[in-house]
Image (spheres, rainbow, N blue to C red):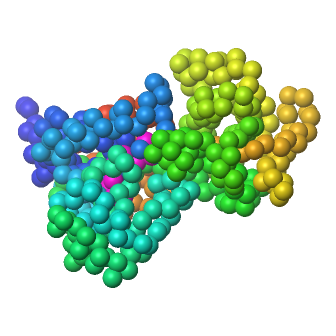
Amino acid sequence: MAVEKKAPVSSSILVVGGGISGLTATLEAAEVGYEVFLVEKNPFLGGRVAQLNQYFPKLCPPACGLEINFRRIKDNPKIKVFTMAEIEKVDGGPGNYQVTIRIQPRYVNDNCTCCGECAKVCDTEIPNEFNFGMDRIKAAYIPHNMAFPARYVFSSDMGADEAKRCKEACKYNAVDLDMEPKILNIQVGSIIWATGWSPYDATKLDNLGFGRYQNVITNMMMERLASHNGPTSGKILRLSDDQPPKIIAFAQCAGSRDEKHLPYCSYICCMASLKQATYIRSQYPDADVYIYYIDIRTPGRRYEQFYNQLKADKKVHFVKGKVAEVNEDPSTANIILVAENTLTGEKIKQTVDMLVLATGMQPNTEKDKPIANLNMNSDGFIINDYDNSGIFAAGCANKPADVVSSNQNATGMALKAIQTLVRR
């Protein structure tokens, strides 16, 4: 005798996080007919990929993958996007989740044409978070040139009188200073948690000088320096004097594989440094690049080939040894690093123009604990329970991963979310 399946209370899906994993999961579910609510805490979609200069495997710029996804989202009536929004509470179970969403005011409505007149009359400047504080922007700003939705945002640092001037300058009635936080309650059958990752806080690595010396930067800061929409319009320059670096070093496993910080391998760091070595060699053919490493991890044949190409470059030098100490020459702002070559036992003291810390990825769920019934490991990654839960972690909310792996995983989690609905 066939068992009758119980219909789900809701056939909608909630995706939390609008990075590459969240976008993929949203589109995969919506394009087979399911209603999807996409919630993102930032004013724009795209996540970390939007901050990259290029990404593997084809070394594409972010526009290569994001632009078409934004178009697909815009054209799909099944998708409802909420930016500047966070999950306040999740109740219920598979097939019947009640979710409370808090949406913060942007103070700019859908009439915005990105004309920039509001920014012209705004005097207040704030650190540019998209560029990791390496430059400043107006308090009336568009997050970056490819931001979706393409609308300005008003920072809370803007004064009331200044906000009024912005409103008066707008010709399209797009400024709404009466906007207030909104609470939205929705019912969904399954949830995909795709909240992504943040670079590990390099200021916690006391011996590596980040935050004390200007020419010690992180790998994500290097991505922004190399990006045409970055703080230097794509030119890799020293932060201390805006000069081209002639000798650049990379310190691998900066915080990763360290019981005091991140005990796991962050998967992406080796390939990120190899990729960034190509940025430098492209801009500065005479520059020398030194990569200090514990192990070089290049998962897959394609990545291994990329590594071999770099090894064949006589201006790229691989040193098996971990950077132990970093100081600065105050007269030049050059960086003096100390390491031990574990193959020869030699203690190395080297002066470089710039040091790049290959900081690892920390799941955002470690810092912002999900307000939901989820299993998490000691590092903050969500452990998926495919048998008993209707909430599934995708991409880097589940484990460290690159863009390709995150996309593949997100597609699988979209299928799991759909299965939750049809099996109820």
- Asked where in the image residue 66 lies, by quadrant, the reply is top left
Task: Name the side, left or right, on which 157 lies relative to 173.
Answer: right
Q: Residue at x 33, y 53 (%)?
A: 44
Task: Name the side, left or right, on which 158 lies relative to 69.
Answer: right
Q: Residue at x 35, y 78 (%)?
A: 162
Residue 377 seen:
no
The residue lying furthest to the right in this view is 346
Task: Name the side, left or right, on which 306 lies relative to 370.
Answer: right
Viewer-proximal residue among 351 and 318? 351
Main SS, magenta residues: loop
Q: Residue at x 24, y 73 (%)?
A: 167
Image x and y of residue 38, in percent: 25, 51
Residue 346 vertical position relative to residue 308 in the rendered view, above or below: below
Residue 278 vertical position relative to residue 78 in the rendered view, above or below: above
Callout count: 0
Image x and y of residue 83, in percent: 29, 58
Q: Residue at x 43, y 42 (%)?
A: 49
Q: For residue 27: magenta?
A: no
Viewer-proximal residue among 133 and 388? 133
- Asked where in the image residue 111 lies, by quadrant, the reply is bottom left
Residue 237 seen:
yes
Viewer-proximal residue among 69 and 163? 163
Viewer-proximal residue among 362 and 93? 362
Q: Which quadrant is the N terminus positioned in?
A: top left
Q: Please provide the residue range marked out in magenta.
A: 39-49
Q: Which quadrant is the C terminus positioned in?
A: top left
Q: For residue 43: magenta?
A: yes
Image x and y of residue 308, in percent: 65, 18
Image x and y of residue 183, in percent: 22, 70
Task: Name the side, left or right, on which 316 lies relative to 133.
Answer: right
Residue 337 vertical position relative to residue 85 in the rendered view, above or below: above
